[in-house]
Image (tube, helix red, strand yellow):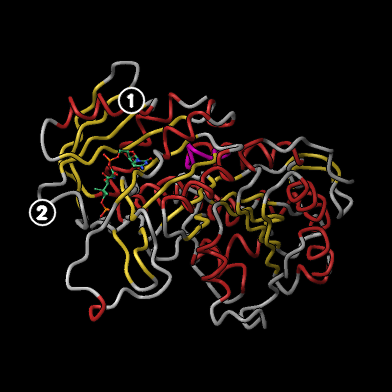
C-alpha cells in the first residue's frame, strides 16, 4: 500500500536528513517519503544495506533526492569515510524500514555496513521505524533490543497492525507517513529550537584599502561572530556568515567572504529577505581613506603622508531602513572601553536596533581575539541581562536563548 500523502511539517523543511534503508518489503514506501521530503525543501541523503538494494534500486532514491546513494562502506563517492561524512552531515536520521536484523545489529553496536556504521558515527537524533512479520516483532529478543535503543535516546515509531506481506495479520507494518513525519518533527523540535529560522551574522574587522597593498582595519578576529553562527547552525537555523575572517568549516553555515564595509552591506542586503535574525558582531569600520591610491604609495616619493578619512555608512542603520529589514530582529554589538550599559543603550536607540550586546574591548581576557567575552545585553523593550565572563560559544547560546522568544 503506498504511503498516504502526508504534509511535511515545517521543522523538516531545509533540514539535512539521512534516510537509512534496511532490507524489508516496506523499503519501497521510503522512496515516496524521500520524494515528499525533498520536494518540501529538505536535503535528503540515502544509505542502504545490501539487502535493501534487493527490494529497491539505489537509482530510485537518487532520482527522487537528486543525491548519490551510499550502498556500502567502500562506495566510490570520493570520501574515505562515507559513514563519518554522512553522520557528521545529518541533522536527523530515520532508519526505516528497520528489520529485526538491523535492530539487533544496531543494539549490539555493530558497524559492519554503511547503515550501522553511519548510525554509530552520527551526532544527531535518531528515529527508528521497525517493520517485520508479527511473530518476529513480538519476540522477546527484538523487544529487548528495541528497549535498549529507547534507553539510549533513540525514538522508536511503533509499527502498525494490519495485513502483512507474509499474509498474516498483526503488528509489524511500517508506521504510516504521517506518524513518521510527526516523530521526526518532534525529534527536530526538541533538539533544534531554531529549525526553520534564517539567521544572518557578521564577523571580523572590515578592511578599508589605502592602496593595492595596505588597508586600515582593527583587531577583530571574527571569533564572536563565528560562535553565534555556529550556535545558530547547531540549533537548526540556516545561517549566512558575512565575514572578513577565515573560520573552521562548520555544517550549516554558508560563508560569504567580504573585505570592506561596502561589500558587507551589499551582501547583507541580498541576505536580508527571508531572514528572521541579524546579528552584527563584526567590527565595521567607521572611517576609511577618502581616496584609494591606484599604485602602491612609495616611501621614496614622500617623506610624510597625511591620510584623509571619510565616514563609512552605518550598516545596521541602513539595513533597518530597507523594506525587508523591518521584520528582521536586529542585534548589534557595542565595543566600548567604559560605561558599557549607557553607551550601549545610546547606540541601540540611535541605530534602531531591537537589542545590543555591549562588551568591554579594553580588557585582554575578553573581547577582541579572546575565546571569552563578557558584557550586558540590552533590549529595546527595556530588558537588561548581564552576561558574565564565559566562552564566546556559551555567550552565543545565551544570546540566542534571549532572542528566540522575541523572533516574529
Ligand atoms: O571578533 P572578535 O575578536 O571575536 O571580537 C569580538 C568583538 C569585540 C569585535 C565583538 O564582540 C564586537 O563588539 N563587535 C562590534 C564591534 C563594533 O563595531 O562596535 P561599534 O560600537 O563600533 O558598532 C556598534 C554596532 O554598529 C556594531 O554592531 C557594528 O557591527 C555596527 N556598525 C558599526 C559601524 C558601521 N559603519 N556600521 C555598522 O553597522
Q: Which residue extends farthest top?
A: 382
Q: Position of residue 384 (x, y in %)?
A: 24, 22
Q: Main secondary structure of the magenta part?
A: loop
Q: Position of residue 366 (x, y in %)?
A: 15, 49
Q: Which span is picked out in magenta?
A: 191-197
Q: Quadrant of residue 71?
A: bottom right
CA neighbours of label 2 inside 10 A, class few (<14), some (14 to 19), many (20+):
few
Disc 1 on helix, strand or loop? helix
Residue pictured at 26% horizontal, 77% vertical? 301
Q: Nearer the viewer, residue 159 or 125?
A: 125
Q: Nearer the viewer, mark 1 or mark 2?
A: 1
On whether residue 194 falls in the magenta region, the answer is yes
Rendered position, 215 above or below 336: below
On residue 69, the disc is: none
Contact (Cβ within 8 Å) of mark 1 with mark 2: no
Residue pictured at 28% horizontal, 19% vertical? 383
Q: Position of residue 33 (x, y in %)?
A: 77, 49
For this view, does 407 lie left or right of residue 55?
Answer: left
Disc 2 on helix, strand or loop? loop
In 3D space, how far apart are the residues under numbered discs 1 and 2 (Cα atoms)? Answer: 28 Å
On residue 364, the disc is: 2
Q: Nearer the viewer, residue 88 or 272?
A: 272
Q: Quadrant of ligand 1?
A: top left
Q: Nearer the viewer, residue 239 or 18?
A: 239
Rendered position, 264 above or below 405: below
Residue identified by numbered label 1: 350
On whether residue 337 falls in the magenta region, the answer is no
For this view, does 113 lie left or right of residue 372?
Answer: right
CA neighbours of label 1 inside 10 A, class few (<14), some (14 to 19), many (20+):
few
Q: Position of residue 327 (x, y in %)?
A: 54, 26
For this view, does 22 lie left or right of residue 313?
Answer: right
Amino acid at each position: 500500500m503506498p504511503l498516504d500523502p502526508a504534509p511535511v511539517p515545517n521543522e523538516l523543511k531545509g533540514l539535512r536528513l539521512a534516510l537509512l534503508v534496511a532490507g524489508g518489503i516496506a523499503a519501497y514506501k521510503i522512496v515516496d517519503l524521500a520524494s515528499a521530503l525533498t520536494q518540501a525543501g529538505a536535503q535528503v541523503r540515502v544509505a542502504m544495506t545490501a539487502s535493501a538494494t534487493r527490494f529497491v534500486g539505489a537509482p530510485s532514491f537518487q532520482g527522487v533526492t537528486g543525491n548519490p546513494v551510499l550502498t556500502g562502506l567502500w562506495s566510490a563517492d570520493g570520501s574515505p569515510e562515507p559513514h563519518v561524512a554522512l553522520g557528521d552531515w545529518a541533522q536527523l536520521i530515520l532508519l526505516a524500514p528497520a528489520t529485526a536484523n538491523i535492530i539487533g545489529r544496531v543494539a549490539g553496536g555493530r558497524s559492519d555496513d554503511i547503515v550501522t556504521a553511519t548510525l554509530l558515527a552520527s551526532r544527531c537524533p535518531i528515529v527508528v521505524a521497525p517493520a517485520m512479520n508479527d511473530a518476529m516483532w513480538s519476540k522477546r529478543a527484538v523487544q529487548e533490543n528495541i528497549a535498549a535503543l529507547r534507553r539510549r535516546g533513540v525514538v522508536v515509531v511503533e509499527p502498525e497492525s494490519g495485513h502483512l506481506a507474509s499474509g498474516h495479520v498483526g503488528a509489524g507494518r511500517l508506521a504510516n507517513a504521517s506518524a513518521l513525519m510527526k516523530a521526526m518533527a518532534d525529534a527536530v523540535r526538541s533538539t533544534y529550537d531554531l529549525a526553520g529560522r534564517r539567521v544572518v551574522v557578521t564577523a571580523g574587522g572590515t578592511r578599508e584599502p589605502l592602496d593595492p597593498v595596505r588597508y586600515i582595519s582593527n583587531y577583530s578576529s571574527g571569533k564572536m561572530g563565528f560562535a553565534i553562527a555556529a550556535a545558530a547552525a547547531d540549533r537548526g537555523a540556516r545561517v549566512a556568515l558575512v565575514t572578513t575572517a577565515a573560520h573552521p568549516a562548520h555544517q550549516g553555515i554558508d560563508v560569504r567572504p567580504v573585505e570592506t564595509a561596502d561589500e558587507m552591506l551589499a551582501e547583507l542586503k541580498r541576505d536580508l529577505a527571508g531572514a528572521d535574525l541579524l546579528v552584527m558582531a563584526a567590527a565595521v569600520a567607521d572611517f576609511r581613506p577618502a581616496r584609494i591610491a591606484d599604485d602602491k604609495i612609495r616611501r621614496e616619493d614622500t617623506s610624510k603622508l597625511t591620510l584623509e578619512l571619510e565616514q563609512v555608512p552605518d550598516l545596521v542603520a541602513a539595513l533597518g531602513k530597507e523594506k525587508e529589514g523591518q521584520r528582521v530582529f536586529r542585534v548589534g554589538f557595542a565595543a566600548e572601553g567604559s560605561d558599557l550599559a549607557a553607551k550601549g543603550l545610546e547606540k541601540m536607540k540611535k541605530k534602531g536596533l531591537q537589542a545590543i550586546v555591549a562588551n568591554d574591548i579594553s580588557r585582554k581576557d575578553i573581547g577582541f581575539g579572546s575565546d571569552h567575552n563578557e558584557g550586558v545585553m540590552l533590549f529595546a523593550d527595556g530588558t537588561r541581562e548581564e552576561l558574565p565572563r564565559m566562552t564566546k560559544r556559551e555567550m552565543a547560546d545565551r544570546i540566542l536563548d534571549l532572542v528566540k522568544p522575541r523572533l516574529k
